[in-house]
Amino acid sequence: MLKTLQYAKGYVRIKVTGFSLERFLNMAAFRGIYIWNAVRTPEGVEFNVSIKGFKLLKGCARKTSCRTRIIEKNGVPFILHRYRYRKVLMGGVLFFILGLFALSTFVWRIEIEGNESLHHETIMVFLEAQGLRIGASKFTLSDNAIQQSLLSSFDELSWADVHTRGTRTTIRLTEILPPQPIVNRQTPAHVVASKDGLITHVITWSGAPLVRQGDVVREGEMLISGILELESDTPGTPLVYTHAYAEVWARRYHSIEFLVPFTYSERVFTGQTSVERSFQLLFLKNRRITLPGGGNSFTSYDRITTHIQPGVSGTFPLPIVITTTHYAEFIPTPRTRNLEEAKDLAESMITSRIIREFDFGIDIVDRQIIFTETPSALKVSGLITTHERIDRHVPITVE
C-alpha cells in the first residue's frame, strides 16, 4: 500500500554530491522529509524522495553547499504530464478506468465451500432463484437474506455464511451429521435376513429365534420372530407381539471372474504438442472467442484444459475466463505382457475391486484366486469370503 501511494503521488530519485552529505541528511531528517532506498555511491548518495520533499530539499542543499540532480522520475503525475497533449490516449485510459469501476459493481465469481451431500448444481440453481448469479449487481443482493434463505430451505445445513467482497461471493456451508436411525422398541417387528449367507453367530435380546449357527438363509427369510406364544401347549392362548431385536452374523461368498489379456495398447508420446487458447466474456452471455494460431491436428492425443479467471489481488476477479488447452500427441503401440506381469495386474485389480465394492464394516476373511492361462489372456476366477451382519427389522402388521 505504501508503494502504491508513493507511485500515485509521484516521486523522484536524486543524486546528492558535496562535502557535507551527513549535515544535508541530518537537516532533511530534522525537517521531516521522508527519504527511502538510500544508497552510498563514490560521488555522493542516491535516494528516493516525494515531489513535495524534493522542493523542501532545496533549502538544505543551499545551506550545506550540496548539489542535487534528478536521476529518475516515477509516478502518476509524471505520466500525466508526459501525455498531456495526447487527448485520445488519456480519454481511452479514463474510459478503461471507468469501465473497471463499473464492472466492479457486479459479481463475477461465486465460490461454494463445505458442501458434501448437497450438489454444487443444486445450490447454484437455488442461488440463481435468489438473484445471486454471475453478472448480478451487488446493490440488489443481500448477503444476510441469502444466508437465511439457505438455512431455511435446506435441512441438510446447520450453518451458512455468505460474504461478498469485491467481485467475488464466497459461500461457506456446514452440513449436519447424518441422523442415526431411531429404533422404536414399542413397534412389533420381525428380524429378517438382508442378504444370503451362512449363519455364524446369533445373539438374541428379544423375540423367538428361528435359525441357529450353521443354517443357510436367503434374503428376506425370517430370522427372529416377533410373535411369541407364552403357552404353546395350550390351545387358544393369545399371542404376544414384541419388537424382535438380535444381532445376526453370517459368512457370505462373492465370486469374481475376468480376463487379463496378454496383448494391450500402450500410449507412446511423440513429444509433439500444440496449444489452443480462448477467452470467455462473462458479461456477453459467456461468449467464447478462440484466438488464432492454435488448434489440434493430431489423431491420437491427450488433452489438458485449464481455466484461469484473472483479477486484482484475488478479491476483484475480472469478467473474463482464459481457457488454455494443451494437446500431446501419442501413438498407440501394441505391447505384450508375460504371465507374471498379468498376475500382478490381476492382483491389483482384485484389491481395487474389494476396496470399491465392500464397506469398511465388512470383514474380508478369505480370498481364493485361481489363474488359468489361455493362449490370449489370463483367466482369473476368485471367491471372496466375507463376515458381516445380515439382520434387518420388518414391522409386523397387527390386525
Image (tube, rainbow, N blue to C red):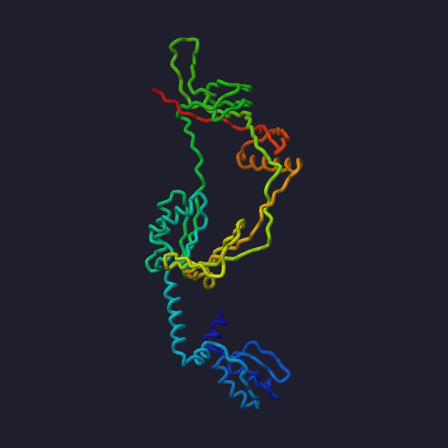
With respect to residue 15, does 112 lie above or below? above
- Residue 79 on image: x %, y %: 46, 78
For the point 52% across and 55% down, the residue is: 326
Q: Is residue 25 left or right of residue 245?
A: right
Report the number of numbered marks.
Answer: 0
- Residue 330 on image: x %, y %: 57, 50
- Closer to the camera in the image, 86 or 40: 86
Displayed quadrant of residue 84:
bottom left
With respect to residue 13, does 301 lie above or below? above
With respect to residue 270, does 350 lie above or below? above
Displayed quadrant of residue 258:
top right
For the point 56% across and 28% down, the residue is: 255
Displayed quadrant of residue 283:
bottom left
- Residue 83 on image: x %, y %: 43, 79
- Closer to the camera in the image, 55 or 183: 55
Specify the farthest residue to the top: 234
For the point 63% across and 42% down, the residue is: 335
Picture quarter with the C terminus: top left
- Residue 11 on image: x %, y %: 50, 78
Q: Is residue 190 left or right of residue 304?
A: left
For the point 52% across and 57% down, the residue is: 275
Q: Is residue 292 left or right of residue 95?
A: right
